[in-house]
Image (tube, grey):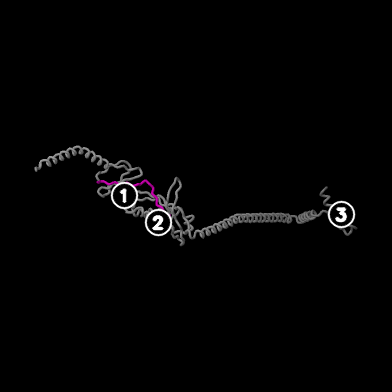
Amino acid sequence: MSFNQGQPQNDFEKMKQDLDKALKLLGPFLIVAIIFVVGYTSFYTVEPDEEAVVIRFGHYQTTNSSGLHFKIPMGVDDVIKVKTKRVLQEEFGFRTASTRGRRSTYSKQNLENESLMLTGDLNVADVEWAVQYRISDPFKYIFQTSSPIQNVRDVSESIMRRVVGDRSVSDVLTIGKVEIETQAQVLMQKVLDRYDMGVQIISVKLQDVNPPNVVKASFNEVNAAKQEQEKAINEAEGAYNKVIPEARGKAQKKISQAEGYASAVVNRAEGDVAKFKAILKEYKRAPKITKKRIYLETMEKLYGKFENVMVIDPKVKGVLPVFNQKGARNE
């Protein structure tokens, strides 16, 4: 029995030659593949609503806006894209379940711990609101805090409870909504700026404000009573505005008439005084003539008040009419 020792060596040489040929054939493909991978990983695109944070070996390098940008490939530069132009929203006391066209459906199940708040007059209000915000600094948003969304929610809930707690329940449910929204937005922005989170608050909107369900019926009755009270007050003020000006006008008319009468009396008295002084002056000059003239004028006035005047003379029998004053006037 004999063994061929040269056969394995020949097979090994053949395999080596085949491997060399394969490497020669695969070499260009590997080079092309490496070049493609390096080229593909050296560029990245940032969308118009995004900004890209570039991290090199774990250290922040820069923030790039939209467009095509270069980075060092092979894992040297890491790019994190953030939606900085998009308006984000956090909801409290409700959740948007679905949106169809312009209609949205909301869910409020098991969210009372977010919306129930104590007001300044020790009442409870069910306040539902939404906070809209955007990322103003993507680097701070990513690296300044581990849970930026939760931080925004915590700050918003804390500020809203503070603002609502400074007002009465009637203000919260009626006329104070706009002031609450404005004040909450300002205070939230101050706190977030202090934390340096890179978040800008766009708006705070009160979605719905109601009394708790357990007291809603009683609250509605109180509101109805208040409305009746306001109605009665308005009606009373209307009657007051109608009666009081009319009474004041009548009083002013009486005062004006009295003042006119007083002026007329004073003027007439002054005229009588002036007339008396003039007669007195004439009387001092010619007493007899003036006295006779005054007597005649007086008698004329007296006789002018009667229709018939008769003179009774004891020497004459019977009564003789001296003249018929009425007939004399007609003649």
Residue at point 37% right, 46% down?
86
Return the disc, 3 or 1, that comes first in the chain's sequence: 1
Using residue 104 as the reference point, say whether residue 24 is left or right of it.
left
Image location of residue 23, percent across then percent down: 18, 39
Q: Tell me if label 3 and label 2 are in contact, CB under 8 Å.
A: no
First of labels 2, 1 by sequence position: 1
- Callout 3: SS: strand
Q: Identify residue type, mark 3.
A: Pro
- Say what amino acid the circle numbered 2 marks: Glu
Mark 1 lies on a secondary structure that is helix
Q: Amino acid at mark 1?
A: Phe
Residue at position x 17%, y 37% in the image:
21
Residue 80 highlighted magenta (yes or no): yes
Residue placed furthest toward the right: 317
CA distance for labels 3 and 2:
116 Å
Residue 321 numbered tag: 3
Between 120 and 219, the residue placed more toward the observer is 219
Query: In the figure, residue 247 lies in which quadrant?
Result: bottom right
Relative to 187, 295 lies left or right: right
In the image, the segment drawn in magenta is: 75-93
Say left or right for 302 vs 74. Answer: right
Quick one: label 3, few (<14), some, or many (20+) residues within 10 Å? few
Tell me the crowding category of disc 1: few under 14, some 14 to 19, or many 20 or more residues within 10 angstroms, Cα based: many
Does the magenta run of residues contain 246?
A: no
Between 256 and 294, which is closer to the camera in this rendering?
256
Name the residue that disc number 1 marks.
Answer: 139
Q: How many marks?
A: 3
Q: Which mark is residue 244?
A: none
User: What residue is shown with label 2?
Assistant: 157
